[in-house]
Image (tube, grey):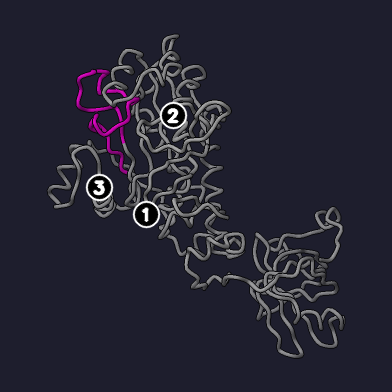
């Protein structure tokens, strides 16, 4: 690998997208060899960085001989530094090309284990085996550029509204969702678990500081193997004091619209590359009973306390480009911490909801129970031991307001927004029941 002064390179380096504004200037840039062509008297390198592509053209008799001869020996995906004169070229992408005066191979690539072209037919499992190479693909980069916009926009939307950005534990002493689908870890002399959710902690914090936002990893030990589930994912969460389900549904409505708006604004090139057509969603609110009645009418399977995948897809068919909030959810279908309707312990309905977007559930949320005695009763009804939740229950004994919140998985949201075939495409290094590497 050639030595190069990285400090000077950063000072002088031009991103490829900015080179096209520098008419007939000498420019310096670095990137990966995206493609090569050798026409004997003319040789081409197409060089790529995170911002775009540019053609480097060597001409026999005009380009320094050593550079011209070396151009044909550089393998694809090698890292190179180029200095040269930018000139007009009708044949080159963007109408510009570089005539090199200096060319350094910083890192020579070995034979690639997978095809990294945008027309690659390499199957997803093989691509994930070599994800660090798959990330060289422009299509793969486009997915994660958009995901970056999603995460930044989510935080931006709520921080600008006065929410506090917080960081919550990932190791917990008892289930935060109920059930047994947890990953157990040894924590010194105790047993602990990887958090299924930041749920209990974000409630405790919101009951003191009112409005919080976080993006945090969570783990689910379900032994599923579907195109829509991961065993490790990252959640975009909010929690708000003095709020019920209606309040936080309105907050999600605003946030999703803002995120889509920002993706449309900042990721036009990536959306075009992925052939994704987006529009800011319409909004619809429906009671669970109304959805069930509609599904019965459409002859689509729908559970008594949950929506089937088929019913979620049908909602998208009936209400395209729409974020559908399904509320007044049956109490039996919600976790122990969701408030019964009207704070009535005997209610069969809850203050919980699901949000369905582009044919898939992207979020569950609702008002939480802030009354210790009611919380203890709900834990008992779910077969959970209140002793395991003592600290959580006690946190509501010292002045806890009504509060509500929700979470959206960032990989799930990316998967849905871009219409990807598999959620693993929207995860940098997926973790499922069969994959723990790379």
Q: Is residue 159 above or below residue 227?
A: above
Element at label 1: loop
Q: Residue 145: x and y, percent?
A: 57, 54
Could you tell me how far apart the alpha carbons at marks 1 and 2 are, in whole angstroms?
A: 25 Å
Give the side of residue 9 with respect to residue 120, left or right.
Answer: right
Could you tell me how far apart the alpha carbons at marks 2 and 3 are, in whole angstroms?
A: 24 Å
Q: Main secondary structure of the magenta part?
A: loop
Query: Residue at image x 36%, y 24%?
Result: 368
Which residue is at the far front?
189
Element at label 3: loop
Give the residues drawn in magenta, as a range: 324-353
Name the mark nearer the viewer: 1 or 3. 1
Residue at numbered disc 3: 308
Circle 3 packing at 10 Å, graded few (<14), some (14-19), many (20+), is: some
Residue at numbered disc 1: 226
Element at label 2: helix
Check if residue 335 falls in the magenta segment.
Answer: yes
Circle 1 packing at 10 Å, graded few (<14), some (14-19), many (20+), is: few
Name the mark nearer the viewer: 1 or 2. 1
Tell me the quadrant of the picture where the N terminus can be found. Answer: bottom right
Query: Residue at image x 20%, y 22%?
Result: 347
Query: Residue at image x 39%, y 30%?
Result: 248
Residue at numbered disc 2: 199
Query: Is 333 in front, or is 71?
Result: 333
Query: Residue at image x 44%, y 35%?
Result: 196
Which residue is at the far bottom?
40
User: Quarter-wise, where is residue 166 in the image?
Assistant: top right
Q: Residue 136: x and y, percent?
A: 61, 64
């Amino acid at each position: 690998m050639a030595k190069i002064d990285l400090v000077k390179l950063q000072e002088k380096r031009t991103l490829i997208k900015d080179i096209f504004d520098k008419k007939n200037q000498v420019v310096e840039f670095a990137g990966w060899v995206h493609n090569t062509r050798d026409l004997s008297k003319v040789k081409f390198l197409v060089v790529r960085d995170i911002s775009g592509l540019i053609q480097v053209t060597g001409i026999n008799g005009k380009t320094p001989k050593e550079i011209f001869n070396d151009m044909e020996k550089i393998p694809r995906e090698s890292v190179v530094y180029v200095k040269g004169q930018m000139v007009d070229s009708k044949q080159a992408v963007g109408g510009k090309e570089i005539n090199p005066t200096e060319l350094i191979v910083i890192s020579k690539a070995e034979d690639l284990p997978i095809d990294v072209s945008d027309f690659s037919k390499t199957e997803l499992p093989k691509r994930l085996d070599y994800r660090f190479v798959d990330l060289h693909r422009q299509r793969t980069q486009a997915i994660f550029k958009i995901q970056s916009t999603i995460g930044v926009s989510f935080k931006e939307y709520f921080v600008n509204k006065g929410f506090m950005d917080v960081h919550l534990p990932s190791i917990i002493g008892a289930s935060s969702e109920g059930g047994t689908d947890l990953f157990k870890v040894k924590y010194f002399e105790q047993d602990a678990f990887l958090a299924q959710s930041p749920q209990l902690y974000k409630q405790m914090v919101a009951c003191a500081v009112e409005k919080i936002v976080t993006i945090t990893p969570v783990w689910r030990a379900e032994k599923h193997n579907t195109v829509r589930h991961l065993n490790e994912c990252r959640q975009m969460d909010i929690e708000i004091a003095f709020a019920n389900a209606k309040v936080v549904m309105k907050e999600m409505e605003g946030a999703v619209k803002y995120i889509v708006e920002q993706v449309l604004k900042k990721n036009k090139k990536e959306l075009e590359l992925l052939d994704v057509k987006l529009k800011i969603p319409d909004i619809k609110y429906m009671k669970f009973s109304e959805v069930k009645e509609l599904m019965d009418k459409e002859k689509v399977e729908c559970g008594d306390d949950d929506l089937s995948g088929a019913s979620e897809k049908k909602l998208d068919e009936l209400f395209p480009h729409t974020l559908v909030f399904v509320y007044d959810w049956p109490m039996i279908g919600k976790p122990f911490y969701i408030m019964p309707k009207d704070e009535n312990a005997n209610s069969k309905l809850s203050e919980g909801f699901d949000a369905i977007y582009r044919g898939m559930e992207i979020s569950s949320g609702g008002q939480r129970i802030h009354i210790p005695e009611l919380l203890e009763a709900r834990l008992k009804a779910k077969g959970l031991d209140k002793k395991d939740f003592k600290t959580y229950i006690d946190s509501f004994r010292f002045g806890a307001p009504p509060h509500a919140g929700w979470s959206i998985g960032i990989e799930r949201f990316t998967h849905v927004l871009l219409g990807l075939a598999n959620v693993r495409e929207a995860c940098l290094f997926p973790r499922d029941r069969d994959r723990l590497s790379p």
